[in-house]
Amino acid sequence: MKLTADLISNSPTYINAIKEFELDLSGSHIALIENLGATRNLYDAINLCNNTVRILGNFPKLSRLQSIYIADNRVASIERELATHIPQLHTLVLSNNDIAELVDLEPLKEFKELQHLSLVNNPVAFKPYARLWCIWRFSDSLHVLDFERITLAERKEAKMLFEIPKGGLSDLAKSILEIESNTAKTFVPGEGLAETDQSDTMDIDKQQSIAELKARIREEMAQVEAMEEFV
């Protein structure tokens, strides 16, 4: 199904559990992100879970958008210029997708406000040093990775692994950045439409996984806010 202005206007909207104004496009058989200008920059969060999106990109300038929930898709690449279109993004849930290499995540380092990131059950999450790489490579604003709070000890370990004393890149960091990924590329309009969702109904297990995912996000963010208030 195409993501049309009509689909956007007819989809549910609500204030979610973390007080974001959310547009719910989950389970709509969407293969390609498009026409989001029709949102008129009204939403804090967009839920694209349980679709068939393959490329995270093609967003218009949405200065209000802070959270994207896009678990249970087929995302394998991220548009290089994505941060210029959604500069205030602080939560990105990419659980259960197809991102394969650490270098495929490079566009995320441009997000200066990114605080919560989930890469659970992507092939990249099983790469050696994946967690430490993300901690080191992305903004210091990143507090929670894969629903686990980042510790100071992890930040120190990551810096030791990927930097040399004079501030350059270690051999390990260079080797990771030299990997040529088959999926790291600029967004091409129309790409991602070749495959369509063959299922006509949303799988019940996936509906349950989305609900559980949102619950984990709410719980983690509540814990972070409580810790910040304590400090």
Image: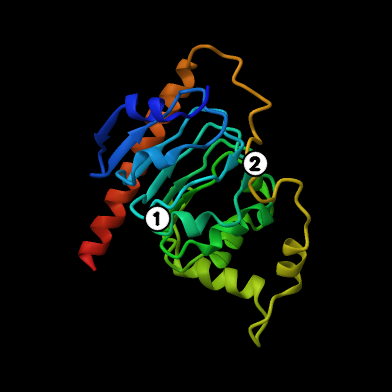
The residue singled out by tag 2 in the image is 76
Q: Residues within 10 Å of mark 1 (few under 14, many from 20)?
A: some
Q: Nearer the viewer, residue 15 or 124?
A: 15
- The CA distance from mark 1 to mark 2 is 20 Å
Residue 123, compared with residue 204, is above or below; it is below
Question: Disc 1 on helix, strand or loop?
Answer: loop
Q: Is residue 198 left or right of residue 141?
A: right
Image coordinates for residue 218, horizontal then vertical, percent: 31, 42
Left or right: residue 29 versus residue 216 is right
Based on the displayed image, in which of its 4 quarters is residue 172 positioned? Answer: bottom right
Q: Which mark is residue 82?
A: none
Count of numbered labels shown in the rendering? 2
Identify the amino acid type marked 1.
His
Seen at 61% across and 15% down, the residue is 198
Residue 37, how many percent across, how many down? 41, 42
Q: How far across and down, in percent of the image, does residue 178 sit?
A: 78, 63
Residue position for label 1: 90
Residue found farthest to the top? 200
Q: Quadrant of residue 113?
A: bottom left
Is 122 located above or below residue 116 in the figure? above
Q: Secondary structure at mark 2?
A: loop
The kind of residue on which mark 2 rests is Ala
Q: Residue at x 38, y 58 (%)?
A: 88
Residue at the outermost bottom position: 166
